[in-house]
Amino acid sequence: MSNPADDQAQRTLAPGPRHVAIIMDGNGRWAAERGLPRSEGHRRGVDAVKRAVRAAIALRIPVLTIFSFSSENWRRPLSEINYLMGLMKFFIRNDLDDLDEKGVRIRVIGGTDKVDPELLELIEVAKARTASNTTLELVIAFNYGARDEIAKAARALALKVQTGEIAASDVTADRLAGELDTAGIPDPDLLIRTSGEVRLSNFLLWQCAYTEFVFLDVYWPDFAQKHLEQAIEIFRRRTRRFGGVGSMAPA
């Protein structure tokens, strides 16, 4: 016989997340613990991205955002930066056909400064080719920093005020959100960070105001569908209040 308490717990579980964001951390430490170069950790990290995309599709998650390259990552050694840029090019060239066939729509957020023009062209090709796909929206945060994103949005609104397009009193949270790179994308319901680190690292600071955080003690190259399922299970057992007194969806 079923346990009434278990049945009640199942009935009160929250629905699954519509938007999952992931800070993919631990490539370097994964490699170091195995006596391998950091580049091998990054290469294996790309394999984990592919697994995460397949898992998101299997679990029917509409939006998956991955933090692939921070605007602060330019401080890393040039050889590592060049390798990471090469991996991004390889990922697009090698996997675009498969992503398109699976119905994945690619969207890239972040700045374009310092980025190789060849890579920028590949990104535009990937975005255009997958624009009508609806199975999964894969948002790649590349050359991205949340503080820069918010400052850029604030400058855009300031210019509109200066030119008289809007009044200063028209500057609201919703208007600012509409100027962010993520305009039109629902805020993340769940943010996962791998490697055991417990911080946001300048990722989606505005968008994560009411996001549930799950920190997993697994390096990104080892990430698999079971880890995504584990994080979702934790998410579904939480009560989201959005400033209220009970679980509810944001207005």
Image (tube, rainbow, N blue to C red):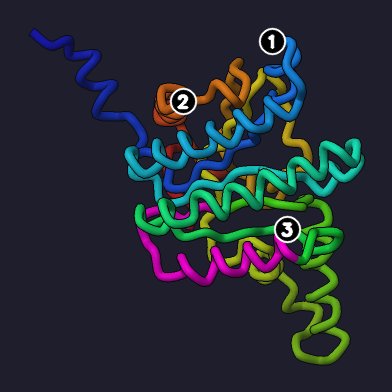
**Which secondary structure lies at badge 1?**
loop
Say the numbered circle drawn on residue 34.
1
In the picture, the quarter occupied by the N terminus is top left
In magenta, the rendered stretch is 118-138
Q: Quadrant of residue 123?
A: bottom right
Question: Residue at coordinates 75% horizontally, 52% vertically from top-left?
Answer: 144
- Mark 3 lies on a secondary structure that is loop
- Residue type indicated by callout 2: Ala
The residue where tag 3 is placed is: 110
Residue 120 lies within the magenta run = yes
- Residue 149 is left or right of residue 140, and the answer is right
Amino acid carrying label 3: it is Gly
- Mark 2 or mark 3: whose residue is earlier in sequence: 3
Contact, mark 2 vs mark 3 (Cβ under 8 Å): no
Q: Position of residue 44 (x, y in %)?
A: 60, 28
In the picture of the structure, the residue carrying the numbered disc 2 is 224
What separation in Å lies between label 3 and label 1 (alpha carbons)?
32 Å
